[in-house]
Image (tube, helix red, strand yellow):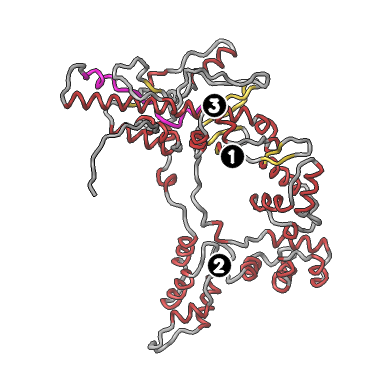
Amino acid sequence: MVMKASLQLKLGQSLTMTPQLQQAIRLLQLSTLDLQQEIQQALESNPMLETSEDDDNQNPEPADNENSAAETSSSEESATAAESTPDWDESENGPDWSSETDSPDTIPDDLPVDTAWDDIYQSAPASSARNEDENDNDFETRNSPTETLHDHLQWQLNLTPLSERDQAIAHALMDAVDNHGYLTSPLEEIHSGMVDESDEDPLDLDEVEAVLHRLQHFDPPGVFARDLQECLLIQLNQLPPDTPWLAQARLVITHYINLLGNRDYAQLLRRSRLKEDQLRDVLALITGLNPRPGDTLDQAEPDYVIPDVIVRKHNERWRVELNPEIAPRIRVNSSYASLIKRADSSADNTYLRDQLQEAKWFIKSLQSRNETLLKVATRIVEHQQGFLDHGEEHMKPLILSDIAQAVEMHESTISRVTTQKYMHTPRGIFELKYFFSSHVSTDEGGECSSTAIRAMIKKLIATETPKKPLSDSKIAAMLGEQGIKVARRTVAKYREAMHIPPSNERKRLV
């Protein structure tokens, strides 16, 4: 077979993303911390970029009246996205976004060096001068790692006078303690792992148990327990002898802990021979104990969230602003930019021209990112004003396509904007994705948000009778009376998602 080369002309369409558009999309999906790292990396790698001086944006003089003061505040707090922050009231259709706003989907393919736009990108106004006292904070206090349970136990062991033999047993027992403070291995297993048959004086199981009883007096109370019953008894034994109802609490924990766990109060009253008011006092003492003593020390480091958007109410209108502290103000270095010569094609001049091009595209991408973020956040707040005014029960159903149509962008862009972006509201800090939820039909033909239904379930459970808690079927029936069609299994799913136990585990004495 002979292969012949030939030329063919075909007509087709393909989607090509320019490097600048790829950069804009990548910046769009970055979280606040990742964005700060990206900006810092750009400042270090591109000599054309620099942070703007704080004195470029001094605070203006105080205004004479309330209206001018509000305008001054708005001017100072204007962030990267727009020259003025959008707001609206309920009588308006929403903010009017002009066609001048550029989205990441419409960034031009080419950017000439001699562009006419402002080369200064301000992502945040000049921060007010920090108090000098902030620099005096103890660095070690703010950055030292949290003490773990093992560290706390080791510190106490170092202060406890023990023989070398008992020290070895104590370390073996300590290695078997989990993060909750419980001993995870049987004493027989720990003992067998330490026995040396060639030793003239072999280790006895009683010695291991004696050291264990000594370690069970360590802090926090209840540590080194082998099960929940022993953990609670250890804590009861460390209470003062004159503690009210101490003997009865020991009786209940020692003999009737299973009835207590099943909340079978009728059997518990009959077998313990306690009256209802007496049992109530005993249970109050027991519930004051800690079933997981290690949790008081072995806590995870808190995750700090920096909100990207701030929502506040001003003059009966919800105002949406970008957080002025999320990123530094950057601009093109005019000194380096002035070194570029138009007709010079040398390597140095080409390098400067390329770096200037990249700097301007980076500034434009940041501006486009924040404009898009502000657009989306504004539409979310406009749609969920009921939540901001009245709480979760007034959350409306919302999906990505609703916001995508409102801001005339693709759903994938909305998904990028709402991922790992947070909004600070008077009701707390929420991820933008929190405001999106599915819907359930109502009898009137309307729709109810799943978030609102979860809030209703939580409210019903909070107001239930403790002696006779509401079952999932009863909650579904009560929601049905309000016109919300929810199946029992849906109620169970929402309840479990909120970490609320079933009705049999919520039952308690008044």
Q: Answer with left or right where residue 349 lies relative to residue 69.
A: left
Q: What segment carries the magenta color?
A: 320-340
**Residue that badge 3 annotates:** 407
Whether residue 40 is situated above or below residue 163 in the rendered picture: above
Indicate the position of residue 30 as horizontal and vertical percent values: 44, 37
Q: Who comes first in sequence, dot 3 or dot 2?
A: 2
The span from disc 3 to disc 2 (Cα, nearest Å) is 55 Å
Q: Would you say residue 74 is visible in this rendering?
A: no
For marks 1 and 3, the one nearer the N-term is: 3
> Is residue 265 rendered to the left or right of residue 27?
right
The residue pinned by badge 1 equals 434
Amino acid identity at mark 3: Val
Foreground label between 2 and 1? 1
Q: Are marks 2 and 1 in contact (CB under 8 Å)?
A: no
Q: Residue at x 67, y 49 (%)?
A: 494
SS assignment at label 1: helix
* Mark 2 residue type: Tyr
